[in-house]
Image (cartoon, rainbow, N blue to C red):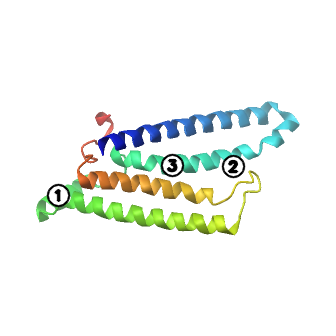
Amino acid sequence: MTACLRLVRLLERACLVGLLLGMTALFAFNVAMRLFGGAAASGFGWIDEVVRLMNLYLVFLAAGLALERGKQVAVDSWRDRIAARLHLPLRRIIDLCGLCFSLWMAWLARDMAAFVFGTGQRSATLDLAIGWIYVAPCAGFLLLALRYGASLAGSIDRFALRGEAAE
């Protein structure tokens, strides 16, 4: 499981870096074209939509990594006090609920993507199937489910790394 998670992390980072660099380059090129391109700039209107789509994928694909590194919003003091007072395995309950919720959301996103692909809707600017917008949440929630499942199984300790000092 650890080798699989290591490979997933490597692929995630590579995708995220590629997306971020690609977005930056496209956006900078678009700004330069608007400033210096004159009439030719109107032919690059598609860049805005590509950058928006890339940003959507960037956000959802980063969710699993953010969860594993403890970068999600959490009320630690409340959670730890309640767990100590009630002697409940609250972290495991949170992981189980997160796993179930993430799988459910991935299922819903998959259904929505299939529905939208089935309608044949296409982007007017890119001539790309609009269903690709719903693939991003599906992938992101599956990556979240992987992290919640790994934490539940004890393969990772997502609660150990907290704050900037942990990096």
Q: Which amino acid does label 2 sit on?
A: Glu
Q: Distance between the residues labelled 2 and 3?
A: 16 Å
Q: Where is residue 153 in the image (x, y as percent from the top left)?
A: 25, 53
Q: Can residue 114 be seen in this view?
A: yes
Task: Give the residue at mark 2.
Answer: 49
Does 91 sit above or below residue 39?
below
Task: Give the residue at mark 3.
Answer: 59
For mark 1, give the secondary structure: helix
Residue contact at pointers 2 and 1, CB within 8 angstroms: no
Question: At x 55% / y 49%, what residue is drawn?
Answer: 57
Question: At x 24% / y 63%, what residue is drawn?
Answer: 93
Q: Where is residue 143 in the image (x, y as percent from the top left)?
A: 42, 52
Q: Distance between the residues labelled 2 and 1?
A: 46 Å
Image quarter for residue 45? top right
Locate residue 44 relative to residue 142 in the image: left or right.
Answer: right
105, 41: nearer the viewer: 105
**Label 1 packing within 10 angstroms: few (<14), some (14-19), many (20+):** few
67, 148: nearer the viewer: 148
Residue contact at pointers 3 and 1, CB within 8 angstroms: no
For mark 3, give the secondary structure: helix
Label number found at residue 81: 1
Question: At x 64% / y 33%, what residue is drawn?
Answer: 25
